[in-house]
Image: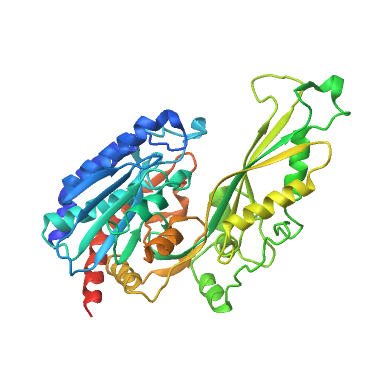
């Protein structure tokens, strides 16, 4: 087959190009990397041009730019809009990496680097799959690319871009590879994502740091108080203890829960992989259900006082925490933010002052399994994996999925090739060579089947 031959002949180049992209520390959350984020945008633009798009451009926003490109072969044919992002998470804590996060290492069949899976490796699969179709003159439909640089900070400027460019990015389906599958021998397609509310809290006690010997025991310690407040946010059954938090939460049917339970999953292997003795979560739900169809509240960071080398007997003035809540259908990120703020202020004792600072959020999304696009993706995976993929809801959040549907009226297909074990957002993030090349092999079939099915 010409495409398979092209892949085999260009595997080394495809890998080297990805490694070059991974060397760019495009950390959108830290302004000292601004030049690198913009450099990554330029790299993506140039590679799209090399792959064969008719035009590619860097589209400014109030933050980092969107890279837009397109190849329109026939206006009467269906159009696929590929979404991805070129920004990455911060690499901290650096000391836990086995190799520098922006010096990619290929080892034991994996690419180790920040952004290897999330999302540079998965995004770049699309560029190379598109190249294969164009260079072999078998592209069956129109393709547009919209690759942003702010996904890891909430895609704050993507909606204004989408609103202002509705006609430019008009398409029949949005194809997104920023999710995972069950295993390399158990393909799956994500059909649901949780929403997100992310915030920061500040607890203030005395007006300055105090000597813990002189004042300890007489003045409230904000770190102690913050810990008490956070521990009260769950009840004994690990349900979130905020009034109204579960109002309207979708109760997933027994049929869907049974289907989830049929997915291959070993609790013992799960615990062994994480090096934990036991799992913990909401009572009466399985581990897979807890991380996909149930809402959560977690502390993502907590700090205050003295954390330098040696000892400093200080009673701190302030304590801080970053908190995220994963949401499910029928939960509004804005409403949950307000409920949290009201509750956190209510439970604050009189001897401290609290402040809740919203960061960003997004809504939960459920994608249809009866659409032409989903069927094309399923058939493509079946072609290259030899198995029909399992439709599966997952626990991550991609808030732009619901935004695309609301603003553009377009459904998405979440066509990920990563694994949950790829350590995204963690030290030693990786992406399998198998997964990278399998994605490049599979995506052309999606275009083929989507074009064929759209004609009927």
Q: Can residue 49 be seen in this view?
A: yes
Q: Position of residue 140 (x, y in %)?
A: 17, 66
Q: Quadrant of residue 234?
A: bottom right
Instruction: For the N terminus, give its image quadrant.
Output: bottom left
With 95 as the anchor, is 233 left or right in this view? right
Q: Is residue 182 visible?
A: no
Q: Give coordinates of residue 321: x percent, y percent.
A: 65, 39
Residue drawn at (58%, 53%), measured in percent from left and top?
271
Q: Is residue 99 left or right of residue 299?
A: left
Residue 179 placement: quadrant: bottom left
Q: Position of residue 16 (x, y in %)?
A: 24, 40
Q: Residue furthest front?
A: 164
Q: Which residue is drawn at 62% across and 57% down?
A: 335
The picture places residue 285, in percent across and down from the top left corner, at 64, 66
Location of residue 373 with respect to 148 vertically, above or below: below
Vertical arrangement, residue 45 with respect to residue 136, above or below: above
Residue drawn at 47 percent across, 43 percent down: 153
Quarter of the view holding residue 28: top left
């Amino acid at each position: 087959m010409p495409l398979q031959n092209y892949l085999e002949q260009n595997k080394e180049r495809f890998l080297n190009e990805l490694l070059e992209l991974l060397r760019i520390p495009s950390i959108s959350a830290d302004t000292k990397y601004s030049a690198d984020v913009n450099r990554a945008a330029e790299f993506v633009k140039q590679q799209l041009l090399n792959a064969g798009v008719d035009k590619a451009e860097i589209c400014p926003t109030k933050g980092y730019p969107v890279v837009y490109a397109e190849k329109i072969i026939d206006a009467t044919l269906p159009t696929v809009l590929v979404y991805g992002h070129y920004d990455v998470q911060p690499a901290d804590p650096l000391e836990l990496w086995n190799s520098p996060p922006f010096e990619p290492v290929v080892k034991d069949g994996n690419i180790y680097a920040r952004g290897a899976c999330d999302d540079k490796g998965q995004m770049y699969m699309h560029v190379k799959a598109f190249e294969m179709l164009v260079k072999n003159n078998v592209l069956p439909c129109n393709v547009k690319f919209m690759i942003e640089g702010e996904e890891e900070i909430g895609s704050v400027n993507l909606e204004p871009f989408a609103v202002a460019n509705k006609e430019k990015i008009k398409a029949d389906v949005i194809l997104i590879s920023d999710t995972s599958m069950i295993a390399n021998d158990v393909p799956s397609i994500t059909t649901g994502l949780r929403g997100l509310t992310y915030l920061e809290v500040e607890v203030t006690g005395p007006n300055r740091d105090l000597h813990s010997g002189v004042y300890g025991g007489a003045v409230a310690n904000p770190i102690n108080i913050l810990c008490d407040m956070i521990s009260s946010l769950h009840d004994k059954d690990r349900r979130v203890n905020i009034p109204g938090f579960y109002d309207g939460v979708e109760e997933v049917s027994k049929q869907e829960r049974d289907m989830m339970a049929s997915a291959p999953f070993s609790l013992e292997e799960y615990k062994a992989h994480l090096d934990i003795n036991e799992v913990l979560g909401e009572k009466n739900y399985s581990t897979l259900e807890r991380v996909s169809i149930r809402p959560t509240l977690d502390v993502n960071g907590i700090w205050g006082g003295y954390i330098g080398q040696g000892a400093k007997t200080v009673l701190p003035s302030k304590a801080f925490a970053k908190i995220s809540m994963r949401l499910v259908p029928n939960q509004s990120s804005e409403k949950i933010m307000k409920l949290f703020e009201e509750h956190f202020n209510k439970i604050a004792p009189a001897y401290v002052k609290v402040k809740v600072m919203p960061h960003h959020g997004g809504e939960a999304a459920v994608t249809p399994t009866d659409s032409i696009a989903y069927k094309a993706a399923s058939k493509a995976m079946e072609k290259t994996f030899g198995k029909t993929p399992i439709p599966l809801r997952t626990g991550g959040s991609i808030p732009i999925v619901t935004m695309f549907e609301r603003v553009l009226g377009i459904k998405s297909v979440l066509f990920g090739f990563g694994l949950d074990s790829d350590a995204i957002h963690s030290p030693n993030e990786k992406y399998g060579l198998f997964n990278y090349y399998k994605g490049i092999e599979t995506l052309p079939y999606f275009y083929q089947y989507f074009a064929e099915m759209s004609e009927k």
